[in-house]
Amino acid sequence: METDPLRKRIPEGPGGYAETNRAIWWVGDISNDFKNRENINRDYFGQLRIDTHQQMAETLTQRIQNNPSPSTRELFIGTYEESLEPQVRDAVFRLGEKGYQTRSSGFFGSDDDWRVIGIDVPRTYNPLNRQAQVIDFVPGTFTLDNETIGHLDKLGAEVAYYAGYPVRIGFVPESPDLNSITNQWESIAAVMPDLGSPALPVDPTEAQAAFVDNAQNLGLSSDTIASSPLSGGNTTSGEGFSGGEGSGGGDSSSGSE
């Protein structure tokens, strides 16, 4: 386990933890008392998440109906920009330009009883963390120095690792305000070092599977999904985000990259 003082250790809490490959997973039920203490924030952030995804479904449907051909940069990430949650969209594109291969982004899930808690990042990985914001990265593609980790820490962001490599950056916003969350993501993207060349384009087959999965989770009709060239005419759910960027820490709600 890393001993860097900039990386925090998860405190004990209700339920239990199992640690494997430097990842810590929630393995117990969460007590009602613990849930009640989080209800207020959870409700506000949960509603913001719902409202954001409803608006995304509307704008993505309109985009496919009115202008289904993806732009050059959309082909590069494998999805429409409307498939990415608005608060993290610009940050995801900027990180891609800097060379980071992202997998999922935005609101972190909605499950209460089974949750990845993470590594040394107690704020981001609160078991009731609908309010948490995350960007997941393809494992093994970059490292971070202590200076960058320090900058991220000052911005309220935390880093999760797998096998020694960063796999997730996340934070818990101070308030359920999409503009302030957007600004925080843009500040985070700004301090991430440039890796020297843009991220590689995603595999088209994997991107198709992820796009279909995300569009279905947003509630788009099969006809609308099939009419998009990004679906390859396929309306069956695929492998999730294995090939690119989506939303919600892998909750299949925003697209592939």
Image: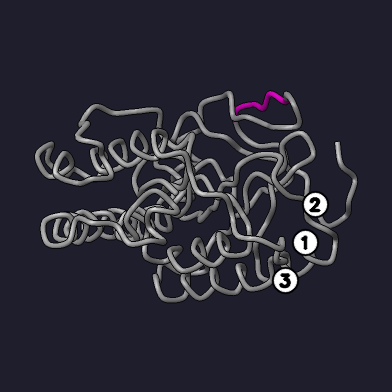
Where's residue 37, x and y in %?
A: 48, 50
Judge whether residue 17 is colored magenta. yes
- Pointer 2 local density, CA inside 10 Å: few below 14, some 14–19, many at least 20: some
Mark 3 residue element: helix
Span of residues in magenta: 15-19
Mark earlier in primary sequence (2, 1): 2
How many discs mark residues in the rendered view?
3
Query: Label 2 to label 1, Cα distance in Å?
Result: 9 Å
Locate residue 106: give its quadrant.
bottom left
Where's residue 153, x and y in %?
A: 73, 65
**Residue under circle 3?**
154
Prevailing SS of the magenta stretch: strand
Three-letter amino acid code at the position of disc 1: Ile
Mark earlier in primary sequence (2, 3): 2
Mark earlier in primary sequence (1, 3): 1
**Residue under circle 2?**
7
Q: Is residue 48 above or below residue 16?
A: below
**Residue under circle 1?**
149
Mark 2 residue element: loop
Camera-nearest label, 1 or 3: 1
Three-letter amino acid code at the position of disc 2: Arg
Camera-nearest label, 2 or 1: 1
Three-letter amino acid code at the position of disc 3: Lys
Q: For the N terminus, which image quadrant?
A: top right
Query: Label 2 to label 3, Cα distance in Å?
Result: 13 Å
